C-alpha cells in the first residue's frame, strides 16, 4: 500500500507547474511514512515542504496543488494538509481488505520486494579462524549474517554468502604446533605446551586421531636442545617463545610434514565448523581460502595495483602501505622483511577479488573489536583504484550468557569455552537464531538460557510460534466439525470485520512489507522480530476475545481468511529469521 501511495504522489508531482525545470537530478523522491496517530491518517508525506524552495512556493500551496493532481483512487478516501505542509492520506477499508487477499495470493513470497533489483551483494560473515570450534559469539554472527542475507534476497538483491577461511598465517602455525606437541605428550614425551598454544580439548582429540599418520614425527629426537628457545611466559615472552618453537618444528620436521599436520588440523576443525553452521541454518555458498589468494597470485595482483598508485615504499627490507595518507595513525607493512605478505595484504586482495567477481557491495560482518580496522581496509580498496564506498561493515557486539540472573562463565583457563553447538543443544536452533537477532547488532546481547527454553508467553519465540500453531488448531477444529472454509466467500465478506481487534490486525498485516524493506535497508533484523511479536500479540488478543467458527458463514469465512493471512505472515517472517513455524505445539 505504501508503494501505491508513493506512485500516486510521484505521478502528481510530475504534473506540477515548473517541475520540469528542476531536471531529474533535482527532483526529490516522495517519502511516504506511517503516521504516529491514525487519527491523522494512515500515511504522511513531506514532499511539499521539500519542493518549496526549488519551486519558490509556499509548502501548503504546493501540497494543495499535489492533492488536486492526484486522481481519484479506490485506495484513498481522504487527503488533508497538516501543519506546515504535510499531506496526510486516509486509506479506504477496501485497501486493507485487498492486502489480506494479497497475502494469501502471494503466499510464501508476500512481503518480498524489488528495491534491490540489479544489485549484486557479497555478504561475508563469521569467518572465524579455523583454530577451534565456533563459540557463542560466532553464533550471533552466523544468525545475523544469514538473516541479513535472507532479508536482502527478499528485497530483490542478488546475494552471495561467503565465509573467509583464514587458513594461512601465524595462528594456523600455532595450531599445527599445538597439535604436534599434544602428539608428543600422548606418546609419553615430557614436553610442555607453550603458553601461547591452543589448549582446548579438541586439540588433544585432533592429535590422537592424526598421530598414526605421523609416527616418524612423534619422537623425542625432534625436541629442541635445552635452553635453545627463548623463555616462555610468565618469566619470558610468550610470543617469542611460540614463534621460536614454530621455526624449530618446521626445521626438524620439514616443511612438508609441518604443513601436513596443519592441514590435518584444518580439515578437522573446518569440517566441524561447516557441520555446525549447516545445522544452524547458516549456509555460505562459498568457503573462500585465504591461502588460495597467495597461490593464485591474487595478493601480488593487489599489491601491484597499490604500488602503481604510488602508495607503497620500501623500508628496512619490508614493503609498507602509506596508510597515513588516508588518516591512519601509522603506515602498515604489506610484505615483511622475510618476503612473507601480511594478513592486511591478503585482506585487501580478498576485497579486490570480491569486487572483480562483479559485486556492487561488499558487506562484511565483523566483531566489534575490529572497528579500527575498517578505515584501513577502505584505504586499501581506494589505493587499488576502487571506491571505498563499495565496502560496508556491520559490527556485531559481544554476547553474555545468563541463567536467570546469574552470568555464565564463557571460558576457562584450560581453553575450554561454551560452543555454539552446546548452546544449540541446550536451547534449540529456533531460540538461538531468534534471540541472536532480537537486539541490534551494535548493542551487547544478554542471552537468558532459561527464558530461551521456557514454554511461556515471556519467551518471544514460543509466543510467536504458538500464534502460528493456534491458527492451525482453529482450522483443525473446523475440520472436526465437518465445516469447510471458502476463501472467496471470506474475501466477499471482509467488510464485516469491524471489531477493534480485527482492525488492529488489518493494520498490522499491511505493515509487513514495509518492515521487511526497512529491516533489509538498515541491516536490522530486530525490526522484523519486533513486528512479529506485535503481530502475534494482536492474534492472541483476537483469539481470546472472539470466536472464529461462528454460525454466520460470511463472518466465519472472513475471520478465517484474516487469521490465515496472519499465519502466512508469521510463517514468512520466521522463515526470514531462520526459525521454524510449527503447526502444533
Image (spheres, rainbow, N blue to C red):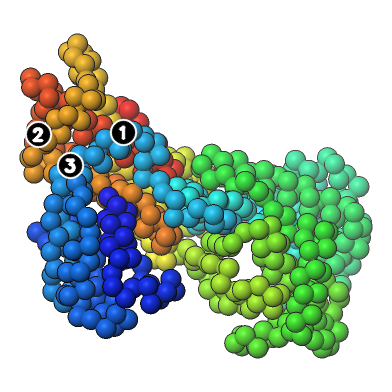
- Establish if 201 lies above or below 22: above
User: Is there CB contact under 8 Å for labels 1 and 3?
Assistant: no
Q: Which residue is mark 3?
A: 94
Q: Residue drawn 53% across and 73% down?
A: 371
Q: Residue furthest front?
A: 17
Which image quarter: residue 348? bottom right
User: Which label was assigned to residue 496?
Assistant: 2
Question: x, y (%) of residue 219?
Answer: 88, 51
**Cα–Cα span, label 1 and label 3:** 16 Å
Of the numbered discs 1 and 2, the one sitting upstream in the chain is 1
Q: Which residue is mark 1?
A: 104
Q: Residue drawn 40% across and 46% down?
A: 112
Question: x, y (%) of residue 512?
Answer: 30, 48
- Establish if 337 lies above or below 432: below
Q: Residues within 10 Å of mark 2 (few under 14, many from 20)?
A: some
Which image quarter: residue 124? bottom right
User: Which label was assigned to residue 450?
Assistant: none
Question: x, y (%) of residue 338?
Answer: 86, 76
Of the numbered discs 1 and 3, the one sitting upstream in the chain is 3
The answer to whether residue 347 of the structure is visible from this angle is yes
- Please give left or right for residue 109 compared with residue 254 in the image: left
- Please give left or right for residue 48 compared with residue 368 in the image: left
**Cα–Cα span, label 2 and label 3:** 11 Å
Q: Quadrant of the C terminus?
A: top left
Amino acid at each position: 500500500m505504501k508503494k501505491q501511495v508513493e506512485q500516486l504522489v510521484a505521478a502528481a508531482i510530475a504534473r506540477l507547474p515548473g517541475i520540469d525545470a528542476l531536471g531529474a537530478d533535482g527532483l526529490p523522491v516522495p517519502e511516504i511514512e506511517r503516521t504516529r496517530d491514525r487519527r491523522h491518517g494512515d500515511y504522511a508525506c513531506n514532499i511539499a515542504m521539500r519542493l518549496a524552495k526549488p519551486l519558490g512556493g509556499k509548502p501548503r500551496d504546493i501540497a494543495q496543488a499535489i492533492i488536486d493532481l492526484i486522481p481519484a483512487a479506490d485506495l484513498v478516501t481522504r487527503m488533508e494538509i497538516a501543519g506546515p505542509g504535510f499531506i496526510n492520506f486516509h486509506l479506504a477499508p477496501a485497501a486493507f481488505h485487498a492486502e489480506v487477499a494479497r497475502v494469501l495470493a502471494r503466499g510464501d513470497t508476500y512481503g518480498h520486494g524489488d528495491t534491490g533489483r540489479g544489485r549484486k551483494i557479497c555478504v561475508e560473515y563469521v569467518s572465524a579462524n579455523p583454530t577451534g570450534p565456533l563459540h557463542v559469539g560466532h553464533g550471533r554472527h552466523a544468525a545475523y549474517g544469514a538473516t541479513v542475507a535472507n532479508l536482502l534476497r527478499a528485497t530483490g538483491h542478488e546475494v552471495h554468502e561467503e565465509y573467509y577461511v583464514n587458513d594461512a598465517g601465524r595462528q594456523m602455525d600455532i595450531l599445527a604446533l599445538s597439535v604436534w606437541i599434544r602428539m608428543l605428550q600422548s606418546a609419553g614425551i615430557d614436553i610442555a605446551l607453550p603458553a601461547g598454544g591452543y589448549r582446548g580439548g579438541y586439540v588433544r582429540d585432533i592429535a590422537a586421531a592424526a598421530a598414526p599418520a605421523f609416527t616418524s614425527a612423534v619422537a623425542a629426537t625432534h625436541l629442541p636442545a635445552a635452553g635453545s628457545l627463548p623463555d616462555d611466559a610468565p618469566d619470558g615472552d610468550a610470543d617469542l617463545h611460540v614463534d621460536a618453537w614454530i621455526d624449530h618444528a618446521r626445521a626438524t620436521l620439514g616443511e612438508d610434514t609441518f604443513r601436513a599436520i596443519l592441514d590435518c588440523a584444518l580439515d578437522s576443525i573446518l569440517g566441524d565448523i561447516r557441520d555446525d553452521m549447516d545445522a544452524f541454518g547458516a549456509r555460505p555458498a562459498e568457503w573462500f581460502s585465504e591461502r588460495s589468494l597467495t597461490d593464485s597470485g591474487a595478493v601480488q595482483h593487489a599489491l601491484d595495483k597499490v604500488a602503481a598508485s604510488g602508495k607503497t615504499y620500501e623500508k628496512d627490507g619490508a614493503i609498507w602501505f602509506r596508510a597515513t595518507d588516508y588518516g591512519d595513525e601509522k603506515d602498515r607493512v604489506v610484505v615483511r622483511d622475510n618476503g612473507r605478505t601480511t594478513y592486511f595484504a591478503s585482506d585487501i586482495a580478498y576485497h579486490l577479488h570480491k569486487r572483480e567477481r562483479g559485486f556492487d557491495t561488499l558487506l562484511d560482518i565483523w566483531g566489534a573489536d575490529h572497528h579500527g580496522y575498517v578505515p584501513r581496509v577502505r584505504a586499501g580498496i581506494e589505493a587499488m583504484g576502487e571506491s571505498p564506498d563499495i565496502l560496508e561493515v556491520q559490527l556485531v557486539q559481544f554476547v553474555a550468557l545468563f541463567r536467570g540472573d546469574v552470568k555464565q562463565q564463557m571460558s576457562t583457563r584450560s581453553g575450554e569455552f561454551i560452543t555454539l553447538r552446546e548452546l544449540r543443544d541446550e536451547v534449540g536452533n529456533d531460540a538461538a537464531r531468534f534471540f541472536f537477532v532480537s537486539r541490534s547488532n551494535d548493542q551487547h546481547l544478554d542471552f537468558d538460557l532459561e527464558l530461551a527454553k521456557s514454554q511461556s508467553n515471556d519467551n518471544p519465540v514460543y509466543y510467536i510460534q504458538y500464534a502460528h500453531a493456534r491458527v492451525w488448531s482453529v482450522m483443525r477444529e473446523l475440520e472436526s466439525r465437518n465445516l469447510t472454509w471458502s476463501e472467496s466467500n471470506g474475501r466477499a465478506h471482509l467488510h464485516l470485520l469491524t471489531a477493534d481487534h480485527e482492525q488492529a490486525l488489518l493494520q498490522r498485516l499491511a505493515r509487513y512489507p514495509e518492515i521487511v524493506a526497512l529491516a533489509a535497508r538498515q541491516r536490522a533484523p530486530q525490526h522484523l522480530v519486533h513486528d512479529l511479536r506485535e503481530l502475534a500479540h494482536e492474534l492472541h488478543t483476537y483469539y481470546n476475545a472472539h470466536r472464529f467458527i461462528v454460525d454466520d458463514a460470511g463472518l466465519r469465512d472472513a475471520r478465517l481468511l484474516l487469521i490465515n493471512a496472519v499465519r502466512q505472515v508469521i510463517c514468512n517472517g520466521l522463515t526470514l529469521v531462520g526459525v521454524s513455524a510449527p503447526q502444533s505445539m
